[in-house]
Image (spheres, coloured by chain):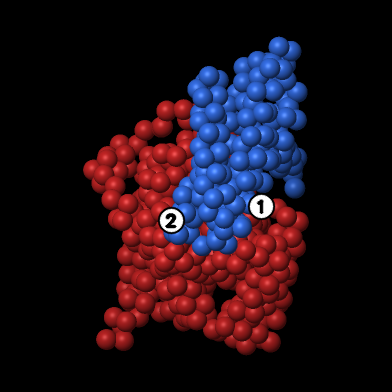
Amino acid sequence: MKKYFAVALGVLTAIGGFVDIGDLVTNALVGARFGLSLVWVVAVGVVGICVFAEMSGRVAAVSGRATFDLVRERLGPRVGLANLLASMAVTLLTFVAEIGGVALALELASSVNELLWVPLVAAAVWVVLWRARFSLIENVFGLMGLALVVFAVAVWRLGPDYAALWHEATHPTKPAGEGLPTYAYYAVALFGAAMTPYEVFFFSSGGVEEHWGTRDLATMRANVFVGFPLGGLLSVAIAASTALVLQPAGIEVDTLAQVGLPVAVALGKLGLAVALLGFFAATYGAACETGLSVGYSISQYFGWQWGKYVRPAQASRFHATLLLCSIVAAALLLTTVDPIKVTEYSVVFSAVALPLTYFPILVVANDPDYMGDRVNGRLANGLGSLYLVIILVAAVSALPLMLVTKAGM
Amino acid sequence: MTGPGRRVAGLSVTALLLASCVTPATGHDSYSDKAVTSVRAATSEVQTARLVLQLLSRHRIFTPYADETLTANEEAVGSIATTFRSVQPPRGDDELRDAIAGLLSDAEDAVGHARIAARRSDPVGTGDAAEELRGVAGDLARAEERLS
C-alpha cells in the first residue's frame, strides 16, 4: 500500500511540477497566436524529456551519484566546464524568470507592484531552500501545481468543437499571416520550454537526495512515463484555452495576467482564484527547483558537499551558492527587466544549451563502469540519438531564428 | 577562449542586441510594415481591455486582477505608440504617420479610461469605456485592413 502511495504521490507531483513559467507563458502565447498548430512540438518535447529524465534517473538510482557528478569524471574538466557554464547560465536565467513569475502572480492577487514583491519572494525562496526538507519542497509545490488542471476544466466548460481542435492539432499548418521563420522560432521556443535543462539536473540530483536504489527504478519510471506526459497535457490545455478565447479576439499574450483570462471567461472568479494558486505554486516550485539545480551543478563540478540530505553547515558552499543566486535574481529583477521577456529569452537559450546538457547523459548512461548491466538498451539509445539530432537542429537554429524574426515579432 | 570561440561569442551577442533593436524604416514598405505591426499590437491590448471590462461587468474577475491587467495594457499601448512615433518616416509617408499615431493615441486614451473606470468600480464609466474601446478596436481593424 505504501509503495502504491509513493508511486501515486510521485506521479501527481510530476504532473503538478511539470509546468513552470516558461511552459505557462510560451504555451499561452503560442496558443493565442498559432492555435493548436504547434501542439506537435509539445508532444516531441515531452517524449524527449521522458527519454533523458529516465536515463538520468537510472544513472542516479544505479550509481548513487547525480548524472552531472559523473560528467566531469567521465568526460574531463573541459567538457564538464562547458556543460556547467552553458547549463548553469540558462538555469540561472530560468531561476530569475521563476522568481519574477511568483512576484507577478502575487501582484495579480494583491495589486501590490511586482517590484515590491521581488525581494520578499527571493528571500522566501532562499529560506525554503535553506530550511525546508527536500521532500517537502517537491511534494507541496508539486501537489499545489495541480491547481493548473483548472485550464483543462476551463477548456471543457468553453465547450469547444473537439473534432476541429483535434484536426488542428494533428494536421499542423502555419496560420495565414504568420511567416515560416516565426512559426519555426516558436517551435524552437516550445521545445526549449519542454526540455529545459534544469529538469534533468533536478531529477537526477533529487534521486540522490532521496537515496534511490535499483529497487526504486519502477517508481522513477512511473513518475517519468506517466507524470511527465500528463504534465504535458496541462501545457496543451493552457494553449487550447488561449486558442479558444484569445486568438479569435486578436489578443497576443505578453503578460501573465492574459494567461488567466480564458479561465475567468469559462469559470469566473473561483476558477481564476484556482489559476492564481496554480501560477504561484508552479513558479514557486520551479524557483526552488532551478535554485537547487544551480547549486547542484556548481557543487557537483567542483566536488563540494551538496544536497539537502546533509545539514547546511556540512554543505556550506552549496548553501552559499543558493544564497548568492537568490541575491543575483532579485538584483536582476529590480533593474525593472520584464520577467515575461526574461522567460521568453530563457526558453530560447535553453534550446541553445540543450546539446551540452543531454549529450553527456547519453554517454554516462552507456558506461558499464557506472551502470553495470543497467546501461541503455537499444530503444533508449535509438531514441536518445534521434533526440540528439533534433536537439542539435533546435540549438543551431535558435539564435538565427531569433535574429530573423526579431524575437518572434 | 579560442579565436573562433571569441568570434562565435561576439556574433551571438551582436545577434541578440540586433534582435531587440528598433530598426529604422528604409522605405515605404518597411514603414508600412512597422505601422501594421504597431496596429496589430495595439489591437491586442485594446481587445484585452475589452475582455477585462466584459468580465468585470459580469463579476467574473477580481478587481485587483482587472486593474493590473488594464494597467499593463495601458503601459503597453503607450510604449507601442512611443516606439512608432520615434521611427523616422520616409518622404511621402507623413500622412500615414499622423493617421497611425492618432489611432494609437486614441487607443492609449481608451485603455486609460477603462483603467480609471475599473479602479473606481464605476459601472457607468465602465460602460462608456467599453463603448470607446469598441470604437477604437473597429478603427484599428479598418486601418490594418487598409495597410495589409
Is A345 in front, or is A73?
Answer: A345
Q: Report the residue at 65% width, 70% height from top.
A: A121
Kind of residue at badge 1: Asp
Q: Residue at x 66, y 65 (%)?
A: A112
Q: Which mark is residue B58?
A: 2
What percent of the width, then of the height, locates residue A170? 29, 41
The picture places residue A153, in percent across and down from the top left corner, at 33, 60
Task: Say which quadrant the N terminus of chain A sits in.
Answer: bottom left
> The disc numbered 1 marks a residue on which chain?
A
Residue pointed to by mark 1: A338
Q: Is residue A74 above or below residue B139?
A: below
Same chain check for tags 2 and 1: no
Residue at 64%, 34% in the rendered image: B106
Number of residues whose C-alpha sits closer than 10 Å to that of mark 1, classed few (under 14), some (14–19) or many (20 or more): some
Q: Position of residue B95 (x, y in %)?
A: 68, 17
**Residue A240 visible somewhere in the drawing:** yes
Please give left or right for residue B71 compared with residue A42 in the image: right
Question: Seen from this angle, which residue lies furthest front?
Answer: B124
Which residue reaches farthest top?
Answer: B92
**The hue in which chain B appears in the rendered picture of the protein:** blue
- Residue for point 31% across, 39% down: A168
Q: Position of residue A102 (x, y in %)?
A: 59, 65
Asked if residue B73 shows in the view, the reply is no
Residue A240 or residue A382, whichever sits in front: A240
> Distance of mark 2 from mark 1, alpha carbons?
31 Å
The amino acid at mark 2 is Arg
Name chain A's colour: red
Front-most of residues A76 and A243: A243
Number of other residues with Cα within 10 Å of mark 2, as a class: few under 14, some 14 to 19, many 20 or more: few
Q: Secondary structure at mark 2?
A: loop
